[in-house]
Image: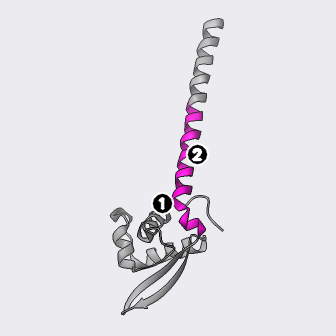
Amino acid sequence: MISDRLNRRESEVMNAVYELAGGKERFLVSPCELMATLPARGKYNEETLERTLDSLALDGYFELVETDRKGEKTYVIHMREAGLGYRRQNAQQKRGLVFRIAVAALGAVVTFLVGLLLRAIFG
């Protein structure tokens, strides 16, 4: 099942995977390549990266197969529909958030103006 919202760590890893995919459905990537793409502030190590990748795979963003390439640990990632549409979904969520904030701000302004009007009439 796909999560409605990813946490910060999952979002950073998904952005890195999406960037490294380069529009391909299947690709090979090493943990070092992935960690080099991730922000330094996340303080990722191989264990946290692997747990996050497993979580994203369980959420249906991609299929993850761990393999060995010339003695180096490598991941085979096959993007699924949710993974391929990740950026679009993320942009839609941000637009929805901006819209909700704008509606709340507009409601606050209208409430303030009605309050001033009532104070002028009955004050």
User: Is residue 73 inside the magenta stretch?
Assistant: no
Q: Is residue 6 left or right of residue 36?
A: right
Q: Amino acid at mark 2?
A: Gly
Pointer 1: what residue?
A: 8
**Contact (CB < 8 A) between labels 1 and 2?**
no
> Which numbered mark, 1 or 2, is in the foreground of this view?
2
Circle 1 crowding by C-alpha within 10 Å: few under 14, some 14–19, many from 20: few
- Work out whether 67 lies above or below 87: below
Q: Which mark is residue 96?
A: 2
Residue 34 in view here: yes
| Left/right of residue 90 with respect to residue 72 in the rendered view | right
Amino acid at circle 1: Arg
Q: In the rendered view of the protein, which quadrant contains the C terminus?
A: top right
Image quadrant holding the N terminus, namely: bottom right
Residue 86 pos. (x, y %): 54, 61
Q: Tell me which label, 1 or 2, sits earlier in the chain.
A: 1
For the rendered model, the colour scheme is one colour
Cα gap from disc 1 to disc 2, whole angstroms: 18 Å
Write down the region rendered in magenta. 81-105
Q: Main secondary structure of the magenta part?
A: helix
Residues packed near mark 2 inside 10 Å, few (<14), some (14 to 19) or many (20 plus)? few
Label total for image: 2
Q: Residue at x 61, y 63 (%)?
A: 3
Q: Is residue 96 magenta?
A: yes
> Where residue 89 appears, x then y in whole percent?
56, 56
Q: Is residue 123 visible?
A: no
Which residue is found at the position 63% from the left and 65% from the top?
2
Which element is circle 2 on? helix
